[in-house]
Image: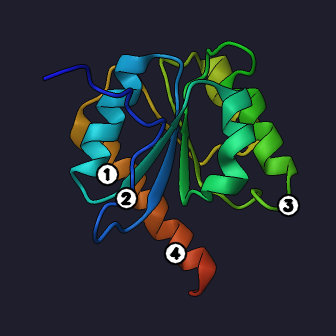
């Protein structure tokens, strides 16, 4: 049978995909868990191991939503969120923190412009609902009036 080639860094386009999600987490197991659950819903998933890699690939990948862990090497999720919000090209991207957050981190995330939080551990259906909700908000920002 031979050896398998290494898996690609990110998934290929899924037929009928309704959005692209950039999943940023230093835990390979969490990245895989999120990726599998979102791909089962027809979403395309791209992964990054930390905030620095996220910032390196975000303009090439052009995600519709980004999920961020908080504690990561090189660049943490809150600093990444702040940098994404400071860049006019990514300022309006929906951002979700998926992490075991303290109250301070939640408040800091809100200050950085994070749109949603999902505490770890989470149920896969909670993750799917969160991401789909952010995708719907993103769609409304693109064409339909958003807000009251």
Q: Earlier in the sequence, mark 1 or mark 3?
A: 3
Between marks 4 and 1, how big is the CA–CA gap?
15 Å
In which quadrant of the rendered image does the N terminus lie? top left
Mark found first going from the N terminus, 3 or 2? 3
How far apart marks 2 and 1 lie (CA) works out to 5 Å
Residue drawn 74% across the image and 33% down it: 80
Horizontal relation, residue 23 to residue 14: left or right? right
Give percent across and percent down for residue 128.
30, 48
Q: Would residue 148 be seen by someone viewing this image from the given angle? A: no
Which residue position is annotated with label 3?
88
Question: Left or right: where does residue 16 sit relative to residue 13?
Answer: left
Name the mark on residue 139: 4
**Residues at marks 1 and 3 touching, judged by CB atoms closer than 8 Å:** no
- Name the residue nearer the viewer: 125 or 103: 125
Residue 55, numbered circle: none
Please tell me which of labels 4 and 1 falls first in the chain: 1
Residue holding disc 1: 129
* Colour mapping used in the image: rainbow
Contact between marks 4 and 2 (CB within 8 A): the answer is no
Question: Is residue 52 something that shows in the picture?
Answer: yes
Numbered disc in front, either 1 or 3: 3
């Amino acid at each position: 049978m031979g050896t398998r080639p290494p898996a690609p860094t990110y998934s290929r386009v899924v037929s009928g995909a309704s959005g692209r999600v950039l999943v940023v987490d230093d835990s390979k197991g969490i990245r895989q868990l999120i990726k599998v659950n979102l791909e089962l819903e027809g979403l395309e998933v791209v992964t990054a191991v930390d905030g620095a890699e996220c910032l390196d690939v975000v303009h090439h990948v052009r995600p519709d939503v980004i999920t961020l862990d908080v504690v990561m090497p090189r660049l943490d999720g809150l600093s990444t969120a702040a940098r994404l919000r400071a860049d006019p090209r990514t300022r309006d991207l929906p951002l979700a923190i998926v992490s075991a957050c303290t109250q301070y981190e939640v408040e800091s995330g809100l200050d950085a412009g994070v749109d949603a939080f999902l505490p770890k551990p989470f149920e896969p259906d909670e993750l799917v609902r969160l991401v789909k909700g952010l995708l719907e908000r993103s769609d409304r920002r693109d064409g339909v009036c958003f807000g009251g």
